[in-house]
Each structure stands twice: as C-alpha cells, then as structure tokens.
Amino acid sequence: MFLSLLFLGGVSYGVLLFLIALVGYYEWLKMNEISIWSLSSMAGLAFTTYYFLPSQITGGLTVEAILLQLLVLLAIAVLSKNKSSIHEVSYIFMGSVYLGVSLHLMLETRLLENGLVLTLAVLLATWATDTAAYFVGKAIGKRKLWPEISPNKTVEGSLGGIIVAIFVLVVLSVFTEQLSTTYALVLALAVSTFGQLGDLVESAVKRTLGVKDSGQILPGHGGALDRFDSLLFVFPVLHLLSLI
C-alpha cells in the first residue's frame, strides 16, 4: 500500500504520511507512559501537525515555530505546577520536532520534480541495507557494532548493508536518467550509513525507556516508529547535506 500511494503522490501520499506522524507521535508518548490527553501532549500534537504540513501552506519550517513550541511547553510545565514535568515536556518537544520535521521532508521530497525517483531510491537503499545487514551479519558477523544499544548488529553486517545499497542504486541509475552513477553512489552511501544510525537512535531510546517495540501496529514487526526509524533520520540528513 505504501508504494501504491507513493506512486500516486499528491494528497493520497500526504494523508498516508500524516497518519504515520499521528501514530508515531502516539507511540512516542506511549513508550514513556505519557498520556495523549495531557495539555503538553496535545500542544505537542498541534506542533507536530504544523511541522508536517507542506511548505506551500505554512511557508516552510521556521526557527520561530520551533522556538514558540519550546516556550509553550516550558510555560505548560510551570503553569501546571510540574504536573507536566520538565522531563516530560522535553521528551515531547524532541519527539514532536523529530517526527513532524522528518515526515515533512519526506513529503517535500515527493513534491519535487524528480521526487518519485528520489524517494524510491532512498527507500530501495534503506531496504537493501536492512536486508543485507541482517543476512550478512547472520552469515559472517563476528564483531559487534554497538552491543550496548543493539546487541545483534555486527560490523560485517553493517558494511554488507552499505555495499549492497550502493550496488542497488548504481544499478537503478542505469535505468533512469534522473540519477547519475556518481550521485547514486553518494546517495546510497549516505542513506545506508545514516539509516543505520537512525535505527540505532531508536534502539537507544527504547533501551533507555525499557521497551522492546514502539508499538504493535504490525504484529510481529513492532510499531510505526520501528518501521520508519531509518527514514526518519535519513531524510533530514539528506536535506542538510543538500543531497536532495
């Protein structure tokens, strides 16, 4: 379904990403046992929605909006007499910006003239990395990549994922004029490297909070955050590096 709506683009794809943002935000709160109905949570939801909206509606992401959310959440912490603690509002602030901005950039990428090919390239590199890292790690993995955060990941698996991602996107570049071979190689390297880092980021959050999965939206596969952890990290990085 994801790929079908990605191909359709427009409102259909935007609605899908917005639903992912809503579910992801709920899972983010649930992992830290924060009620969705608290004043700070509802404020965070409002700002998550604002960050997500396309730039043609809001005029684009601004420092002022992020600063306003910070001030609103800090005010809530004070006015609620710490019913919403500083730890709670800090956690909400981080999740709101992370989810809203990341999914906004996913949407903005699709809206580009070559957005379909670019988004597909990022998805293919991410999936190739995950699949290759798992099988290479199972077959020859010996050195642990980051055992304190994710004990099953190996250095060999990580490198295998990067190599396969590069191969996949270089092959893709042969079939489309919208990706040069050099660009495909650089894009694959960035997506694979930072996608794995994004996976580790979510693992670190879950380990800190003592949870196994972010949710159960997909039985046996975890929640929306578990499925999109790499992409949530990758798209902001690609935009920061001007690769998109």
Image (cartoon, rainbow, N blue to C red):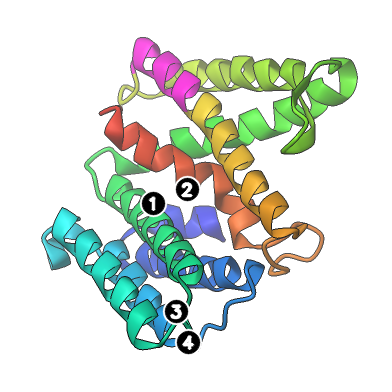
User: What's the CA distance linking mark 2 and mark 4?
Assistant: 25 Å
Categorize mark 4 by other alpha carbons within 10 Å: few (<14), some (14-19), many (20+): few
User: What's the CA distance linking mark 1 and mark 4?
Assistant: 24 Å
Name the residue that disc number 1 marks: 102
Q: Residue at x 78, y 31 (%)?
A: 147
Q: Nearer the viewer, mark 2 or mark 3?
A: 3
Q: Earlier in the sequence, mark 2 or mark 4?
A: 4
Circle 3: residue type: Ser
Q: Which residues are magenta?
A: 180-190
- Viewer can see residue 244: no
Q: Residue at x 48, y 75 (%)?
A: 85
Name the residue that disc number 3 marks: 41
Q: What is the secondary structure assignment of the residue under circle 3?
A: helix
Q: Is residue 61 above or below residue 173?
A: below
Task: Tell me whether the residue at label 2 lies in contact with that at label 1, contact meaning CB atoms closer than 8 angstroms.
Answer: yes
Q: Considering depth in this image, is 8 or 216 the residue closer to the camera?
A: 216
Viewport quadrant of the C terminus: top left
Horizontal side, residue 115 vs residue 203: left or right: left
- The numbered disc on residue 232 is 2
Circle 2: residue type: Leu
Q: What is the secondary structure assignment of the residue under circle 2?
A: helix
Horizontal side, residue 211 vs residue 239: left or right: right
Name the residue that disc number 4 marks: 38
Q: Earlier in the sequence, mark 1 or mark 4?
A: 4
Circle 4: residue type: Ser
